[in-house]
Amino acid sequence: MTKCIMLDVDGVLISGRPTDGQFWTHTMKDDIGLDPSVLVNAFFKEHWASVVTGQSDLIPTLAACLKRHGLDIEAEEIVAYWFANDARIIEDMVSDISDIRSNGIPVFLATNQDHQRAAYIMETLELGMKVDGIIYSAIAKAQKPEAAFFQFAEQSSGFSGTDILFIDDTLANIEGAARAGWNAVHWNGSNSLAEIVTEHSP
């Protein structure tokens, strides 16, 4: 029996730019003069794993990386641009979450995020008012699909794997959740959250 929903964020609840749904780096070079491939190679490939698991902090790590690669742009400007352009909330999903919670089933976000974006999601985007909490990789010190993430989520929420319905758009995360004993559904947008929950309810 489903007693708790665990919901991924990026690609499920949040998708792309608020204006058009395009990926957040779509016009980054024109907007702030930084080629996104440079950012990927200089920062994300080398440093993101440590940032997203809470081993290092986003701004100082990014700033050091930019300096080392001779990039003349402030880390704060990149992060502000990123967060603002990766913030399109899927309103149908929010509506379904509200209905689910009104029926007594808590909904948690279960997501790979650093501390700063997790706070942005919950506070600036005000999703903290729409869900029962957030479980994220930087605080768990492990990221999906690692077993430690799912163990931390169970401990934090108070629900065991058989109680949880987990929805994510990344197949590897679904497989990791299934190995942890969770009921896991691969999100592809073909069914609404409400339909998925109904299908997996007794």
Image: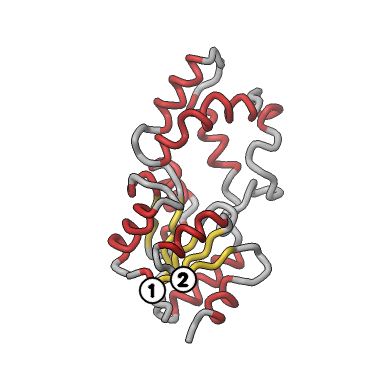
Residue 24 in the image, given as x and y percentages of width and height: 63, 41
Asked if disc 1 and disc 2 are in contact, CB closer than 8 Å, the reply is yes
Q: CA distance from mark 1 to mark 2?
A: 7 Å
What's the amino acid at mark 2?
Asn
| x then y, percent, for residue 113 | 44, 45
Seen at 45% across and 51% down, the residue is: 144
Q: Nearer the viewer, residue 184 or 111?
A: 184
Picture quadrant where residue 31 is located: top right
Instruction: Report which quarter residue 138 is drawn in.
Output: top left
User: Considering the image in quadrants, where does the N terminus appear?
Assistant: bottom left
Q: Is residue 185 visible?
A: yes
User: What residue is drawn where x is 40% and y is 68%?
Assistant: 181
**Residue at x-position 58% and y-position 26%:** 41
Mark 1 and mark 2 lie on one chain; the one further toward the N terminus is 1
- The residue under label 2 is 183
Q: Secondary structure at mark 1?
A: helix
Q: Quadrant of residue 162?
A: bottom left
Relative to 114, residue 41 above or below: above
Q: Secondary structure at mark 2?
A: strand
Q: What is the three-letter code of the residue carrying label 1?
A: Thr
Residue at position x 63%, y 48% in the image: 16
- Please rate how many residues cluster around mark 1, counting C-alpha atoms within 10 Å: few if below 14, some from 14 to 19, many from 20: some
Report x, y in % for residue 197. Answer: 53, 76
Q: Is residue 133 left or right of residue 38?
A: left
Q: Is residue 130 visible?
A: no
Query: What residue is shown with label 1?
Result: 162
Q: In the figure, 178 relative to 16: above or below?
A: below
